Image (cartoon, rainbow, N blue to C red):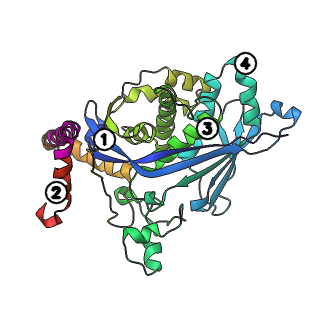
Amino acid sequence: MAVFRCRVVSAPGKVLMTGGYLILERPNPGLVLSTSARFYAIVKPFLEEIKLDSLAWAWTDVKVTSPQLNRESMYKLSMKNLTLQSVSRQVYTGESGNPFVEQAVQYSVAAAYATTDKDRKEVLQKLLVQGLDITILGSNDFYSYRNQIEARGLPLLPESLAALPPFASITFNSGESSGENSKPEVAKTGLGSSAAMTSSVVAALLHYLGVVDLAHVKGTADLDVVHIIAQTAHCIAQGKVGSGFDVSSAVYGSHRYVRFSPEVISSAQVAIKGAPLGEVVIEILKGKWDHERTKLSLPPLMNLLLGEPGTGGSSTPSMVGAVKKWQKSNPEKSQETWKKLSEANSALETQLNTLCKLAEEHWDEYKKLINSCGSLKPEKV
């Protein structure tokens, strides 16, 4: 009798309240909030049963399905060097693969090999030769559904968005775009979909393969492993080492964040040139991850509401590139601007902490004040 094994893990999106662009450089902090929108990764065996000789297989199957994009990709995973090879990508659309998912799979499996004890190697081997069947779903809030809502003749209101079925099919950006004004292929709302997706896939795989136990989290040790692997996979997939606040929020939730030193992922960048992935993962897990994470939450009775101004978010890499280009061309002006932004960010952080302390020490007065503010019309605030 075959025992069916399945793991489902979700990760939230993000909103960076303060620290935009400044957060790229240590020790500038950023205040990041996790969202109610989440990505879900479902991992189960590709094959329900395995034959006795299958443990000697050199390759195993990996299937990745994204129903919202109407996509399905098939891969072969090398049991020797732990890398993926495409067999047939995007059965429905013929489009290219997803580098974030591909790197998440490779680094997660490599982490499993690197951390699994000898007495559990056979269990890991059996799980892998059964293959991996991965399904990815994202909350509707990650994407723009303006076109669908307008096509239904509905007003552009939250109620119209809520009327759509969960995990609805996604709109693709029309037309060609390139350069600094390039748009992502999918019309997104800027909640950190790639980071949330990568983190959910990594977490689900590490949980499925027995590297971490996310059903009984004690402390942060297991989450720290998920964070390191997700950060690495995400950086390699996007081709640069970003600040990492989006992945950090996807793993840990809301907090005050100071980025890690980019050098900690240098070994992973070397892996692209052919270094053994297993050795690279061991080095990364043992590396000095010096990011800082401090507890953060909005003051009680306060919510952050977001709205979509157009047909999805812009391309973060191209925007960051444009800002860095401006910094180099206007060093004095940029330093002055950075200083003013840093001071404003610190002031907001101080005010939020003051409100939280006020709520804790004088709840009745705080509640009365917030309710009074909440009853004001926008023009009087």
> Left or right: 112 with respect to 52?
left
Whether residues under marks 1 and 2 lie with C-beta atoms below 8 angstroms apart, the answer is no
Q: Say which label, 4 or 2, has the lower sequence index.
A: 4
Q: Which residues are magenta?
A: 343-365
Identify which residue, 250 or 231, lies in the foreground.
250
Closest to the camera, between mark 3 and mark 2, is 2
Distance from the alpha carbon under mark 4 to that under mark 2: 63 Å
The residue under label 4 is 119
Give the SS element for disc 3: helix
Determine crowd level at label 4: few under 14, some 14-19, many 20+ residues with C-alpha closer than 10 A: few
Q: Position of residue 337 (x, y in %)?
A: 15, 44
- The amino acid pointed to by label 1 is Ser
Quadrant housing the C terminus: bottom left
Q: Secondary structure at mark 2?
A: helix
Tell me the CA gap for discs 1 and 2.
21 Å
- Give the mark nearest the N terminus, 1 or 2: 1
Magenta segment: does it hold 293? no
User: Which residue position holds label 1?
Assistant: 297
**Mark 1: secondary structure:** loop
Residue at position x 36%, y 28% in the image: 291
Q: Amino acid at mark 4?
A: Asp
Q: Identity of the amino acid at label 2?
A: Ser
